[in-house]
Amino acid sequence: RPTERRPAVAAATPRPAPEALLPTTSPTPDPSRPGTRPGAVRFSYPPAAAPTAPVEWRPPPYPAPLAFHPDDHYWLIRPLPSGTRNYDLDYYPYGSDVLLAQYAPYRIHHGSDFPNPKGTPILAAGSGTVIHAGPLPSARNGVNYYGNTVIIQHDWAWRGQAVYTLYAHTLELFVATGDRVAQGQLIAGVGETGEVSGPHLHLEVRVGQNTYGDTRNPLLWIAPYEGWGTVAGRFVDTAGDMIPGADVTLRYLDGEAEVRRVRTYQGNVKPDDVWRENFVVGDVPAGRYRVELSFQGRSFRRSIDVQPGQTNYVVISADFRYVPPTPTPTPTLTPTPTLTGTLTVPGASAPSVAPPP
């Protein structure tokens, strides 16, 4: 179980070199080509995902695999090239609802979103084998929520478990099931297929099994930018149980400026196998910060030194026992019995038929 630690340096975790080679020529994403969309839209993605401002400057990312500390596993590169918006949509973080008050509650997020214009190249975050390329309708109701989707099973494992990445809502695909891909290879173009209201890439990291219920926070797998790090932590009660739905704000230690805001995990998303976190703030420049948590009118805070190129861990303990809210029971309707068949009336010459239900 992770504990608060001082900066440490360890040898990077080795990973076999990919056997697949980059193609000598790569096709160019073409926004004019239509993608596959579901037959009926059940609901829409809450905020428009298209970029509304120029891409903010970021340093170049560290190469992957990267592990300055043995508990880290930054084995994936950014799934979009530098010069694009290759950082995630911070108001809809992993394990949370949308953090904007003007939008109604939405489903708990199982991945990270990267808004970009149609046709922006999507790159394989790691080498491996394509196990799915095409529409991905739900096994539950047949709706194509993900749209055009690529799933890669990577050619390395984490703690004995297979690791997969999923790339959803793509415009078109440049790989097919069974293809071997190298890290950084062009696999698709950003699109808006499936259940969306704007073009973006939805990325999931799945560990152990290729299922919706086995996702992990991608920000603990994607190598940070040079000179930047990641903050991961646990907000727990007096019994050590994690508290869901608390607002988390990261501020500079010497001021009140807000750097980033997230929320502790809700729903059934899974934490990392080692860090066992319930919140992550990604892409934080190295420096000193204050982590503030707010829950049910109570505030808690801790300071943290963010070291570059690694996960910086913090535990914040509340002084109360968290009691989950009691779910409101759903009323059970008692069916009304109906008559079927024929009804024989004494003294009548012919049977009469019961009225339809």
Image (spheres, helix red, strand yellow):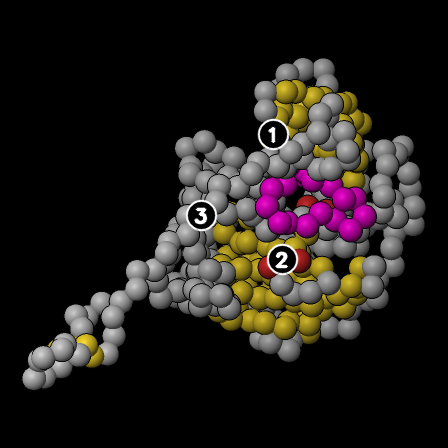
Mark toward the start of the polypeptide (3 vs 1): 1
Give the residue type that dot 3 points to: Thr
**Of all residues shown, which one is farthest toward the top?**
255
Looking at the picture, does residue 215 appear above or below residue 263? Answer: below
In the visual, does 214 lie left or right of 173?
right
Mark toward the start of the polypeptide (1 vs 2): 2
Q: Say whether residue 202 is visible.
A: yes
The residue under the point 48% across, 45% down is: 329
Q: Identify the mark at residue 213; answer none if there is no mark.
A: 2
| 267 in the magenta segment | yes
The residue identified by callout 3 is: 330
Mark toward the start of the polypeptide (2 vs 3): 2
Gap in angstroms between the C-alphas marked 3 and 1: 29 Å
Give the label, 2 or 3, closer to the camera.
Answer: 3
Viewer-closest of 68 and 119: 68
Viewer-closest of 188 and 1: 1
The residue under the point 72% across, 55% down is: 76
In the image, the segment drawn in magenta is: 264-287
Which quadrant holds the C terminus? bottom left
Q: Residues within 10 Å of mark 1 (few under 14, many from 20)?
A: some
Element marked by disc 3: loop
The residue identified by callout 1 is: 247
The picture places residue 174, in percent across and down from the top left corner, at 55, 70
Q: Identify the mark at residue 8; answer none if there is no mark.
A: none
Which quadrant holds the N terminus? top right
